[in-house]
Image: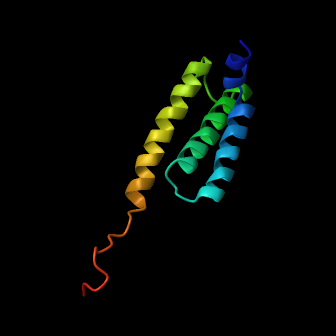
Amino acid sequence: MMLDILLYSGNVWLMIGLLLAILELTNGTLIFFLPTGTSGLLTGLVLKMQESGSLPILLDSWSGALTLWAILSFILSLALNFIVKRKETSDDINDY
């Protein structure tokens, strides 16, 4: 019951997003923490805008917020992998 209330709070999602973005600074891989942190911040922003009344109700439960977070994380992860392509390395250092 308490977890339901916490997962539907915009402030909690903003804190989750900030924590994951800070963890990205320690990891630096741009694969997991940055997309999940950014999507957490966006989910928190949507919930806060709903609470203030400037956005119509899009998310009506904690499961909707969690689903939005997961979908945004997936989309941002794919976008980051597309944007930041890894350089191909040759197998042999003596290959000219």
> Looking at the picture, how far across and down is residue 32, in whole percent?
52, 47
**Front residue of this view, candidates 95 and 68:** 95
Q: Position of residue 41 (x, y in %)?
A: 64, 41
User: Which quadrant holds the C terminus?
Assistant: bottom left
Task: Determine the residue positioned at 61% across, 39% down.
Answer: 40
Coloring scheme of the render?
Answer: rainbow
Residue 58 at least partly seen? no
Q: Is residue 17 above or below residue 25?
A: above
Who's the residue at 72% across and 32% down the image?
A: 12
Determine the residue located farthest toward the top in the rendered image. 1
Q: Can residue 65 be seen in this view?
A: yes
Instruction: Name the quadrant of the N terminus.
Output: top right
- Image location of residue 50, percent across then percent down: 67, 27
**Is 60 above or below relative to 26?**
above
User: For residue 53, what is the image quadrant?
Assistant: top right
x and y percentages locating residue 68 in the rendered image:
52, 30
* Total numbered badges shown on the rendered structure: 0
| Left or right position of 84 against 6 | left
Q: Residue placed at 52% from the left, 55% from the top?
A: 30
Q: Is residue 49 or residue 17 the one in the foreground?
A: 17
The extreme left residue here reads 96
Which residue occupies 66% across, 35% down? 44
Q: Is residue 5 above or below residue 41?
A: above
Q: Measured along the vertical axis of the image, is residue 74 above or below residue 62? A: below
Quarter location, residue 65: top right
